[in-house]
Amino acid sequence: MLAPMARSLVVKVTAGADAPERCAQAFTVAATAVAAGVEVSLWLTGESTWFALPGRAQEFELPHSAPLAELLHVILASGQVTACTQCAARRDIGPGDVLPGVRIAGAAVFVEEAMAEGAQALVY
């Protein structure tokens, strides 16, 4: 019998405080997958790029949703968090500005992760 194929989840969140429900859904799905032992890569793009900065996730509030800062902590502890290169540059965010564990990378890395064998990509 063959061993089951390892699966990974790549979640791209394109919304921030401008679309709080969509943003919270992406973080919730990513954190839930991490908690279930799935290899997770969360990509912060568009307005969600701001959550790569210290203190920004703590400012986010959505009734009946887990605190974004807690979800981000879970993802950073066992997954990968990436801020989009162009999105970060448009907001004057550099590598020295982001939370420990957050990397800044571009489309080529996203495509590589999304196209990896066994990967499932979701965009919110």
Image: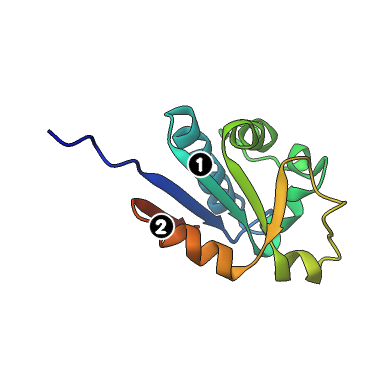
User: Which numbered circle lies on residue 116?
Assistant: 2
**Nearer to us in this view, 96 or 19:** 96
What x and y, as percent, mark residue 123?
48, 59
Q: How far is mark 1 from mark 2, CA to CA? A: 18 Å
Q: Residue furthest left?
A: 1
Residue type highlighted by circle 2 = Ala
Compared to 87, does 60 lie above or below? above
Residue type highlighted by circle 1 = Ala
**Nearer to us in this view, 7 or 11:** 7
**Nearer to us in this view, 80 or 27:** 80
In which quadrant of the rendered view does residue 87 lie? bottom right
**Nearer to us in this view, 16 or 95:** 95
Residue position for label 1: 30
Q: Secondary structure at mark 1?
A: helix
Q: Secondary structure at mark 2?
A: loop
Looking at the image, which residue is at 61% across and 51% down? 20
